[in-house]
Structures are given as C-alpha cells and as structure tokens.
Image (cartoon, helix red, strand yellow):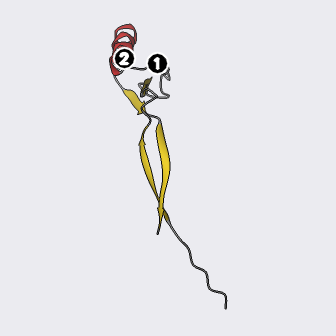
Amino acid sequence: MARRRFRFREYLIAPDGAAMPEFGAECVSGEAADCGAESGVMLGLAEVERWIAEHVRDTGHSHYRRTAGEYVTASPGEWS
C-alpha cells in the first residue's frame, strides 16, 4: 500500500492598496420577473445610492441587490 503525505500552505490574503473597491446595484423589483436595471460598476457607495434613488423616483421600484467588491492579493506563506 502506498502512503501519501499532504502538506498545506498558509496564505495571507489582504486588500490590494493599489485598487479601489467597486460597488453596484440591480433592481430586483417585479412580480413575474425582476426589472433587471443595473447601475454598472461605480467607485463609490454614494454613487450607487444616488442611482438607486433616481431609479426609485423614475419607476417607483423599491427592491434592489447592492453589491460590493474589492481586489485582494494572496501571498504564499509557510508550509505546514
């Protein structure tokens, strides 16, 4: 019988200071189907909230999916 040994490695995952976080929103209002209007990628939360407020004003829709994303770096660490 062959024996195997697996080693695991730790990784440090940290925000990438060279990249800005991204935000977005999608209108999920609707009974039969979601509206589907999207804000697109924005660099500030205030911009997304402004887009939502304008969409509410124009359509009366009240349900949204707001997203936030960030870039990260992963650096290999020690083997265990």
Q: Please tell me the numbered disc located at residue 39.
A: 1
| Residue at image mark 2 | 52
Left or right: 74, with 56 as reference point:
right
Q: Is residue 74 above or below residue 18?
A: below
Q: Position of residue 51 (x, y in %)?
A: 39, 14
Q: Position of residue 43 (x, y in %)?
A: 42, 20
Q: Position of residue 18 (x, y in %)?
A: 46, 29
Q: Categorize mark 2 by other alpha carbons within 10 Å: few (<14), some (14-19), many (20+).
A: many
Q: Residue furthest bottom?
A: 1
State if disc 2 and disc 1 touch (CB < 8 Å).
yes
Q: Nearer the viewer, residue 18 or 29?
A: 18
Question: Measuring 40% from the left and 30% from the top, which residue is drawn there?
Answer: 65
Callout 2 amino acid: Ile
Callout 1 amino acid: Ser
Question: Measuring 56% from the left and 74% from the top, which residue is drawn there?
Answer: 6
Q: Quadrant of residue 49?
A: top left
The quarter in which the N terminus is drawn is bottom right
Question: Measuring 43% from the left and 47% from the top, which residue is drawn there?
Answer: 13
Q: Nearer the viewer, residue 21 or 34?
A: 21
- Give the mark nearer the N terminus: 1 vs 2: 1
Q: Categorize mark 1 by other alpha carbons within 10 Å: few (<14), some (14-19), many (20+).
A: some
